[in-house]
Image (cartoon, grey):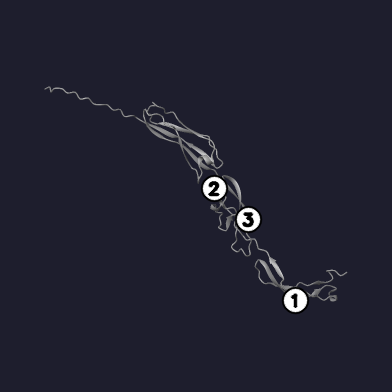
Amino acid sequence: GDTDADVYFNTATASVASDKAGNQEVTVDAGSISLAGDKAANYVWEITNLDNVTVLIDKATPDYPMPEVGILTYDSGRTLDDIFLGDSRWSWVNGNVKPGAGTVTYTAVFMPDDTVNYKTVTKDVTLVINKAQIVITATSYTLTYGDAAPTYGYTVTGLTGADTLASVASGYAIANCAYDLGSPVRADGYPVTVTGYFTSANYDFRYVQGLVTVNPRPLYTNATVTNRNYSA
């Protein structure tokens, strides 16, 4: 009917071969072992398997800076690996991903300088990526009075990477102008407006007008020479 309270081992002295993380060999000082308790005199102790005693020392969590990323603007050619996290020890788990515009979250991992004794740390990082801007500019023209009206068009700037207007946007734009055949010369020209109906997940749109400048048409005449007799 004896219990652990009646007889027990005093704390033994032991040493660990290394304080590094991992399985480390433990050396127990057998001479430091003794029995205690009210009924200790009724027992003798014997310890076996003192060889190959190990203890597992877990890796510690390192001190680490929080990953920091400012507000970004969409770029179709940019991967996560192109986005610096404020400390070179941080890296993205899926670095080849190309993030789109919006508020998006990805996972980053911190690699400590001492990887033997310290564990890696993972954190979710939220990116705020604003849409890039596409500028639709009506084409400008220089005409001469009496010229026929051109087919009005526009140019596109602001696309990133390999994006094309057709690949990233839906909708259309119309360029128009009041100039027509016979329209008179006007000092301020004729505005070419562009009205757009494009939408895109990664781009906003700005529409810029152009101008038709009409120059006067040269008027040519032939001089006529009339012969006459000298008169004093």
The answer to which of 71 and 58 lies nearer the viewer is 58
Quadrant of residue 34 in the image?
A: bottom right
Q: Determine the CA span between mark 2 and mark 1.
A: 65 Å
- Answer yes or no: do the residues labelled 3 and 2 have beta carbons within 8 Å? no
Label whose residue precedes the other's in the sequence (3 or 1): 1
- Count the marks: 3
Q: Which residue is drawn at 85% across and 75% down?
A: 42
Label whose residue precedes the other's in the sequence (3 or 2): 2
Q: Which amino acid does label 3 sit on?
A: Thr
- Mark 2 Cα-neighbour bin, 10 Å: few <14, some 14–19, many ≥20: some
- Mark 3 Cα-neighbour bin, 10 Å: few <14, some 14–19, many ≥20: some
Which quadrant, please, contains the N terminus? bottom right
Q: Determine the CA span between mark 3 and mark 2.
A: 22 Å
Secondary structure of the residue carrying numbered label 3:
strand
Secondary structure of the residue carrying numbered label 2:
strand
Q: Position of residue 88 (x, y in %)?
A: 55, 58
Q: What residue type is labelled 1?
A: Ala
**Residue beneath label 3, please?**
122
Task: Indicate which disc residue 72 carries.
Answer: 2
**Residue beneath label 1, please?**
30
Q: Determine the CA span between mark 3 and mark 1.
A: 44 Å
Q: What residue type is labelled 2?
A: Leu
